[in-house]
Amino acid sequence: MTRNVVFVSIFDLTKVFYEIARGLKEAGHRVFWITTDPYWTEWLIGKGVGRDELLPLIYQPDDFLDDTAQALLRAQIVQAESAAGLTAAECLLMDQFVAAKNPPQIEQYVYLYYRDIKRFLIENKISHLFAEATNLNELIAYIVCRELGVTCLAPGRLRYPADRFVFFDGYLQHRLHPRLDGDRQFSGRQLIDAFAAELPRPHFFADFSRMPVVTPAGLKRSLGNRIRQKALFGRPNLTHHDLDGRMRLVLKRMKNGFYARHICRYDRLEQIHGRVAFYPLHVQPEASIDVLGPHVSNQLELIKNIRRALPFDTTLVVKEHPNFLGIKDLAFFRALRRTPGVKLLYHDVSNFDVYRRASIVFTVSGTSGLEAGLLGLPAVTFSPMYYGGLSTIRYCSDLTKLRELVFGLLQGCRRDLTADCAAIESMTAASYDGFWSGPNYYPHVLASENIARLVHAFTSALEVESPAAAEPSPQYSHSVIDHDRP
């Protein structure tokens, strides 16, 4: 069946999407694009994408809407929020980059994104939208998709086994998009046994943990893009730092990273007595916490809430993510060290060394939750996750119930190995063979063999309708406001 699909461009991942789009077009599907950046818009046009196949979400003050147009769109947005289970205000706060910029007319972008994405999907009869659920425009696109009954899929890594990827239905990561030809090659028991024997680290830990803050290639690429766009000091969109903002971020990371490596005082795991609970810090800003767990995105407060929920004989140990040292302010770690019953470990300590001591693990949505589940350790996630079917994993949606949940896990959680085997077999059955990442750090993602696997996966995903997308709001009318249409 021929489908009309749209890809939402996001930085260098656009190159991967483009190669997949070529394969989909060869299979007879029609492909459209949504962009937010002049550079990638022109890049796609240079590759032969027609301007009528593109929706550039790039605006100037002259594009902003008057009060009448805003009032009409506001009613549609509120109705769409109800169908999506996600509000535009949440979207604004989930995108911490946008929230930090917070331009005076920030709500104008919500109106314009909603209006133009909705019109574009309707006019081109889009059935599937592929995007990473990261930025404001992608989250607004999800709201529109739920309103229209369009299948919204986010590709992402399965995490284990390595080099397998999946499609998540919507912006969260708890529902895996099924595949008609489910892959049944994996034995859950063999995978669990292999994990316990090998204790594999995610490849990005090894690849990024020693990466310097500034690299000549990265600096050249950033400056070159700005010069080509004639936007050295300003960017006409919400998705990029201005040059001065980028420089402040780099200097901050260099200063804070030096502190983290050479000055900060750390506790030693072997000197901690009694039981241990473990919370590995998330990189932030990052979709893994800001989008998947917005109600707990203040990690310092989350740590305090976890500490309050733990028994007196249990020490909460915290470890910074080694890949992006220096992003968090020094004040964060000073406040962390002032919290009773909380210890800070050096960032290079292996998670598996901590698991050997840990009685329970906490994460918003991280790989540590999956690892704990595969090892049979109790773990609490603060976002519903696709690996939540593992027998020792619990999802906490209400922090007032956290203490009850924690005490129950510490006192009576026993692994159900049969359930764990079934859960991991279900996960792998929905996964595809192929490596998924951006090409700047992993150029081999664009290798012809890998692209062929990705094309097969995306083509297969188009054969299955998302159950969530098939339920548009019953009050919805496929109307689009034409007021102030450019």
Image (tube, helix red, strand yellow):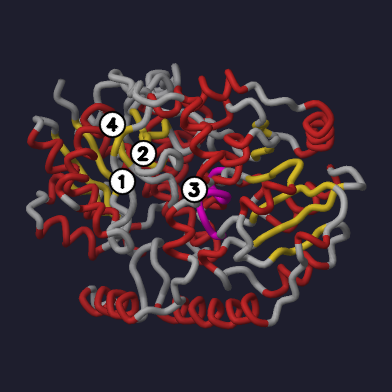
Q: Is residue 121 above or below residue 353?
A: above
The structure residue drawn at horizontal position 61% and vertical position 23%, both measured from the top left corner, is: 417
Q: Quarter-wise, where is residue 340 in the image?
A: bottom right
Label whose residue precedes the other's in the sequence (2 or 1): 2
The structure residue drawn at horizontal position 15% and vertical position 36%, both measured from the top left corner, is: 24
Alpha carbons under labels 2 and 1: distance apart: 7 Å
Nearer to us: label 1 or label 3? 3
The residue under label 4 is 128
Locate residue 348 relative to residue 236 in the image: left or right. Answer: right
Q: Residue furthest right?
A: 312
Residue 287 is covered by the magenta coloring = yes
Binning the other alpha carbons within 10 Å of mark 4 as few (below 14), some (14 to 19) or many (20 upward) gives many
Check residue 165 in the rendering and tell me which mark sits there, or answer none. Answer: 2
Mark 1: which secondary structure? Answer: loop
The residue under label 1 is 435
Q: Which residues are magenta?
A: 284-292
